[in-house]
Amino acid sequence: MRDTRATDRQQGLEVLDMKNLIAGNWKMNGTMGEAIKLANSIVDAIQSDAQLLEKNDFLVCPPFHHIVPVEAELTMAVNIGGQDCSPFDAGAYTGDISATMLKDVNCSYVILGHSERRSYYSESNMLIKQKAQMANEQGLTAIICVGETETEREAGQEQDVVATQMLESLPEGATADNTVIAYEPVWAIGTGKVATIEDITAMHDFIRAKLAEKLEGADKVRILYGGSVKPANAEEIFAVANVNGALIGGASLKAEDFVGIAKAS
Ligand code: 13P
């Protein structure tokens, strides 16, 4: 296994051994019955392998109306979160779910600014920042997603795009406790294409450096990689020093694959 952490240690660089966050974004998939079955299978697979919890924290983010029944099946080992939240707290906002409501049903995380929301619903950095602010005020950890399109990468703009998305979406008072960054290159989502290890390393190092300009304790902020993560490619990805977990779409819908990814960390 490529272990860039070991290399960094040899070079005297500080390496923080934080647990990987293995996060499943279930997106808009499945019936209630399927969601409950998936939750049960994940819990069973994790419970039968004690070492998994030493190295990983787990999170699942089902569709809103599956949160309560899924949460009832989960053990303390698996956190639950939303896939989005409103920038408002309460009131006449048809179709919205507030951070307060997520907190009320035991969510501890919320995914914000996913590229699907940025592109299909034209979510701006400003809106994502407002949502993150609400999430943090309610004690939720905001997973702020960033990532360039293929065209932007081909034009060599990937770092500028990611830096702008991240810095403009981060709320005031963001800390390592209430913020996670997920780097998901848009062209790698659901396509089977994965960024190269060199590209992932370069972008995660860049994100860490940009965070350090903005936040205290930036070295403790988890930076997840997302985009076609599978059991077969997870080991290499997790070996990158500034990768602190994965945000998983398709493979999170099969307990075996989701837990298989965690086993690679
Ligand atoms: P895939 O794992 O299906 O590529 O999706 C990644 C993603 O969008 C997670 O948020």
Image (cartoon, rainbow, N blue to C red):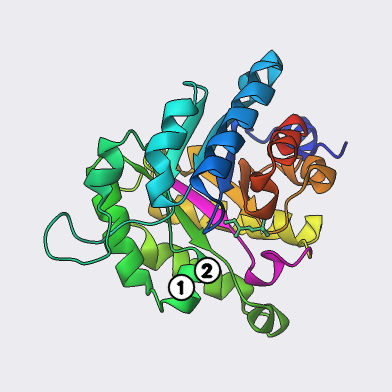
Name the mark on residue 118.
Answer: 1
Given residues 108 and 165, the one toward you in this image is 108
- Mark 1 lies on a secondary structure that is helix
Tell me which segment is drawn in magenta. 179-192
Q: Is residue 32 something one can see in this rendering?
A: yes
Q: Is residue 121 above or below residue 207?
A: below
Picture quadrant of residue 186? bottom right
Q: CA distance from mark 2 to mark 1?
A: 5 Å
Q: Is residue 219 above or below residue 125?
A: above
State the image coordinates of residue 232 (x, y, percent, origin top left): 85, 45
Magenta segment includes 191: yes
Q: Amino acid at mark 1?
A: Arg
Q: Is residue 36 left or right of residue 42?
A: left
Q: Residue at x 53, y 50 (%)?
A: 31
Mark 2: C-beta under 8 Å from nearest atom of ligand 1: yes
Q: Is residue 39 left or right of residue 150?
A: left
Q: Which residue is mark 2?
A: 115
